[in-house]
Amino acid sequence: MHDYIIVGQGIAGTLVAHFLLQQGKKVLVIDKQHHQAASMVAAGLINPITGRNFVKSWRIDELIPFAIKTYQQLEQQLNISILETKPVAMLFNSVKTENDWLVRSSNPDVVDYVADDFQLDFYKNFMEDVQNGVEFKQAGRVRLKELVLAYQTLLQEQGTYLEASFDYQALEIEPNQVKYKGISARRIIFAEGFQATQNPYFNYLPFAPAKGDILLVNIPNYPAKDKLVKHGVFVIHLKEDLYWVGSTYNRDYKTIDPSPKAKKSLEERLKRVLKIPFEVVEHLTAIRPTVRDRRPFIGQHPHLKPLYLFNGMGAKGSYLSPFFAAEFVAYLEQEKALDQEVDIARYYRYYEENEVK
């Protein structure tokens, strides 16, 4: 018998499997390799200060160090390079934004993340309409796709990976175990990303998935490969002359296919701010597993005790997932209580209301 079946192997499922295997648990991962999963397309940003109001990300003081430690361990284990520590440069195109930052910059909670060597003239050389800006340290990106694929190879070598779509109707749920197509396990964990909206056991939760369109762009002679630049759009170096540009944020999407309108918008925004010629190579989309209250969905089904969920990492999955995957495994194996802000028990009433209907 397996200890756990994990359904879904994006960054969330990968890290849950990683921490369970570290504890010697017998795990089977089932995944269909969905190419529009967020982990396959996202830039994997680690960004301590976000948004127009320069908000310090939730619990970032503990999330970033834990994420960096985890990714460094995975680099050694898998013999790959996935973690890039780079400053995030946020450029201002108005006096208002500059003034907003000046007010915010005196707050003690952001001081530790502000780099002191921002050079305005450097950015003005290749960017249009730069009023001023700021760089944030303790930032970077994770090559999520490379990590997920490398870990998939490890699981395949260990015989603990099954490439298949999950058939909910084939799941047999007993009081202390589950059975799935001849496979028995003490528990099953659903880490399906945005596809959890189709999960009959957890779709009562208030998921609010958001579609993101991005462009892969060739920009020869771009001088800021070692920066993560945000000026209307993010411009992030991938390899050689190839850059990730994005992204859009659409909760009212009708299709998961790339949107011509979104592509045009991204191209126009990049053309407006970049002085250097560029060429669009590819247009991709992904669906972020976002939720209404912007906190992860983690925990046990309210009635079916062998069923668990690890989801809702959203646009910040690169630095939420390591910490909460470790917390989740401690909850599963050492009975450590979950943080109430992420425990799906906060929405059990939704399940009861759905059952009444």
Image: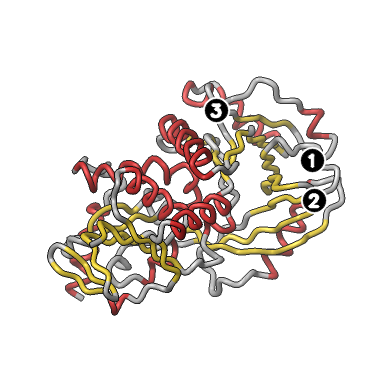
Residue 314: percent from the left, percent from the top? 46, 53
Residue 241: percent from the left, percent from the top? 79, 48
Of 273 and 53, which appears nearest the observer?
273
- Amino acid found under the numbered disc labelled 2: Arg
Question: Residue visible at 37% across and 50% down?
Answer: 16
Question: Residue beneath label 3, please?
Answer: 104
- Amino acid found under the numbered disc labelled 1: Asp
Q: Is residue 349 visible?
A: no
- Amino acid found under the numbered disc labelled 3: Arg
Which element type, helix, strand or loop, lies under badge 2?
Answer: helix
Q: Earlier in the sequence, mark 1 or mark 3?
A: 3
Which element type, helix, strand or loop, lies under badge 3?
Answer: helix
Question: Residue visible at 52% across and 22% down?
Answer: 112
Question: Residue visible at 31% across and 58% down?
Answer: 309
Q: Is residue 138 visible?
A: yes
Question: Residue beneath label 1, please?
Answer: 129
